[in-house]
Image: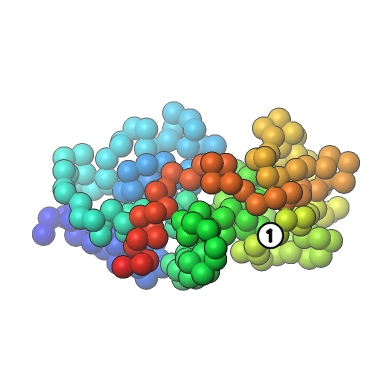
């Protein structure tokens, strides 16, 4: 087994165990696509994936390994997990819930991720990445329906409102300006007077820009 293959096997073990210690840019390169883990930096020329669109490792640029069907499904699951920044147990639990719901399981799975509090904070341009959004939530900068909300994984429902705490307005005012400039997904609305973000309805699949083939993720967990 070569050095590059040993490194990949080690990475896969870490993924299964819920631990990853390498640089974020290597995650994108290993999975063959941008996952926007560094926010706006990923849209600039500084993005490492733009410079090296091949797997990390000494011989990464020359690897042309055939991937199995199981490998394809595993890679899509990993991409989804890293895109939203969750643990293996979270994505597994979301799949179980999605599988029991009416409708398309893959779509239901994505809806769980999209309606998370930390993801909506990110979608509203309150943070440059989902990781940064989680930190803002955990540090208590927001209220949900006028109540304290410091758990990033809270799943919002139609009609729920996120409000910035008064003490956090000074910190987040520049982000509100970005929000007004960029706008929001069609399923969210911003009330400038009250400084709150409202989930007006559940997202539709075509409104979710996740670079993942969710059907392969469903096949991975249904095997």
The residue sitting at 80% across, 48% down in the picture is 196
Q: Nearer the viewer, residue 110 or 51?
A: 110
In the displayed structure image, the side of residue 120 where residue 37 appears, left or right: left
In the displayed structure image, the side of residue 212 where residue 148 appears, left or right: right
When asked about the image quadrant of residue 151, the answer is bottom right
The N terminus sits in image quarter: bottom left
In the displayed structure image, the side of residue 212 where residue 62 appears, left or right: left
Q: Residue 208 in the image: x percent, y percent?
A: 54, 44
In the displayed structure image, the side of residue 208 where residue 118 appears, left or right: right
Q: Nearer the viewer, residue 134 or 66?
A: 66
Q: Nearer the viewer, residue 83 or 58?
A: 83
Q: Residue 115 in the image: x percent, y percent?
A: 62, 56
Residue found farthest to the left: 1
The C terminus sits in image quarter: bottom left
The residue sitting at 43% across, 35% down in the picture is 47
The residue sitting at 37% across, 37% down in the picture is 49
Q: What secondary structure is marked by label 1?
A: loop
Q: Residue 68 in the image: x percent, y percent?
A: 20, 55
Above or below residue 201? Residue 40 is above
Q: Check disc 1 and report the residue beneath it.
A: 156
Residue found farthest to the front: 102
Above or below residue 43? Residue 169 is below
The residue sitting at 67% across, 40% down in the picture is 186
**Total number of numbered labels?**
1
Q: Is residue 79 visible?
A: no
When asked about the image quadrant of residue 190, the answer is top right
Q: Residue 218 in the image: x percent, y percent?
A: 39, 60
When asked about the image quadrant of residue 181, the answer is top right
């Amino acid at each position: 087994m070569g050095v590059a293959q040993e490194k990949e096997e080690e990475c896969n073990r870490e993924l299964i165990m819920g631990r990853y210690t390498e640089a974020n840019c290597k995650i994108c390169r290993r999975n063959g696509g941008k996952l926007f883990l560094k926010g706006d930096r990923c849209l600039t020329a500084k993005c490492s994936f733009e410079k090296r669109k091949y797997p990390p490792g000494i011989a990464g640029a020359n690897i042309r390994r055939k991937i199995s069907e199981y490998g394809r499904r595993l890679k899509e699951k990993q991409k989804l997990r890293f895109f939203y920044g969750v643990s293996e147990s979270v994505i597994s639990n979301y799949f179980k819930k999605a599988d029991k719901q009416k409708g398309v399981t893959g779509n239901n799975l994505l809806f769980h991720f999209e309606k998370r509090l930390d993801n909506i904070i990110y979608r509203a341009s309150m943070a440059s990445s989902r990781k940064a959004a989680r930190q803002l939530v955990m540090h208590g900068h927001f209220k949900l329906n006028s109540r304290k909300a410091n758990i990033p994984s809270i799943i919002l429902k139609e009609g729920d409102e996120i409000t910035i705490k008064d003490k956090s307005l000074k910190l987040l005012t520049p982000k509100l300006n970005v929000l007004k400039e960029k706008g929001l997904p069609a399923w969210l609305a911003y009330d400038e007077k009250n400084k709150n973000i409202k989930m007006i309805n559940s997202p539709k699949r075509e409104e979710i820009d996740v670079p993942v083939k969710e059907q392969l993720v469903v096949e991975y967990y249904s095997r």
